[in-house]
Image (cartoon, rainbow, N blue to C red):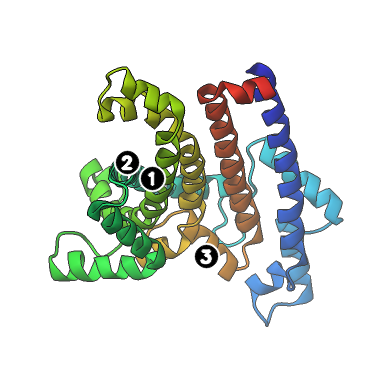
Amino acid sequence: MIRYALSRLVSLCISLAVASVVIFGVIEVIPGDPAAFMLGLNATEETVAALRAELGLEGSVVTRYFSWVGGLLAGDFGTSYTYRVPVSDLVLARLQVSLPLTVYALVLSTAIAIPVGVAAAVRRGGVADYGIMAATQLGIAVPNFWFAMLLVLVFSIGLGWFGAGGFPGWEAGVWPGIKALTLPAVALALPQASILARVMRSGLLEVLGQDYMRTARAKGLSGQQAVIGHGLRNALIPVMTILGLQFSFLLAGAIIIENVFFLPGLGRLIFQGITQRDLIVVESVVMLLVFAVILVTFLVDIAYAAIDPRLRRSA
């Protein structure tokens, strides 16, 4: 187990190193001068040069790359060109929205998908199975931003149960914060729950056809006992992969939903950084999200090894 974890940890470090080079390189090739963009068309060359020096844009590309990476390793993400505050402060403030939203959406997705997928698998070929598969296909096909606007029309404008957007802050209380995140979490969770339910159904159907499941039934276990006691654990292996990918997607890919609901999260911060040419914000936040994706993948691999001992033996 330790050898397997160390091998995956080495792979994680290599992936992070490659990602940092790619992110910094992509940001560097974007045309235009951030300092000139911030100061406007009427700025003099001396003023632009002074701002470039202040923002650390002088020097070679290699020097600036290692300075940026060294700052990341030390917890210094740099200073925002636009907000004139440390990027780490912006990230911490936005994580208070994005992280609870991600966890909320993931919990909703899992709570919906696993029982629905199990119900479809144990009733394979029945009316419930066909109905669930049709509903999940619709959930995958519908864009989440369109579904988000539909939720606003129904539950905010029509029924008045929830606000149409914005976030009051956790200092206003836990319930107002959760209430403000409910519609965005539902908009993010239902498409992901549709994918997860189909994976759960496929994984459980494959497990139900194995010899050990027939042996469990022959020993006198009921169908429900055999599924819960023997089938569900093995069927969860592919589901865990999707859960890891979904957490990463929900954390990094909620830009549209955060803009629909005017949520001050990481996705909206990246969008604002791109439009304002705040490159240090963009590259630092994207690198942080890449780290989160790779870390979640690493944890999923470790969980794989804990569930399936064949991975440990192969490593």
Query: CB atoms at circles 1 and 2 under 8 Å apart?
Result: yes
Q: Is residue 166 visible?
A: no
Mark 3: amino acid: Gln
Q: Residue at x 39, y 27 (%)?
A: 213
Would you name the residue on which mark 2 appears? 118
Q: Look at the numbered disc 1 and give the secondary structure of its residue.
A: helix
Q: Position of residue 95 (x, y in %)?
A: 45, 46
Mark 2: amino acid: Val
As drawn, which residue projects farthest toward the left? Answer: 159
Q: Is residue 52 visible?
A: yes
The nearer-to-camera label among 1 and 3 is 1
Would you name the residue on which mark 1 appears? 201
Which of the numbered marks, if any, corresponds to residue 278? Answer: none
Q: Residue 82's image quarter?
A: bottom right
Q: Earlier in the sequence, mark 1 or mark 3?
A: 1
Label 2 – label 3 distance at C-alpha: 42 Å
**Left or right: where does residue 287 sit relative to residue 97?**
right
Would you name the residue on which mark 3 appears? 272
Q: Look at the numbered disc 2 and give the secondary structure of its residue.
A: helix
Label 1 – label 3 distance at C-alpha: 40 Å
Name above or below for residue 234 compared with residue 154.
above
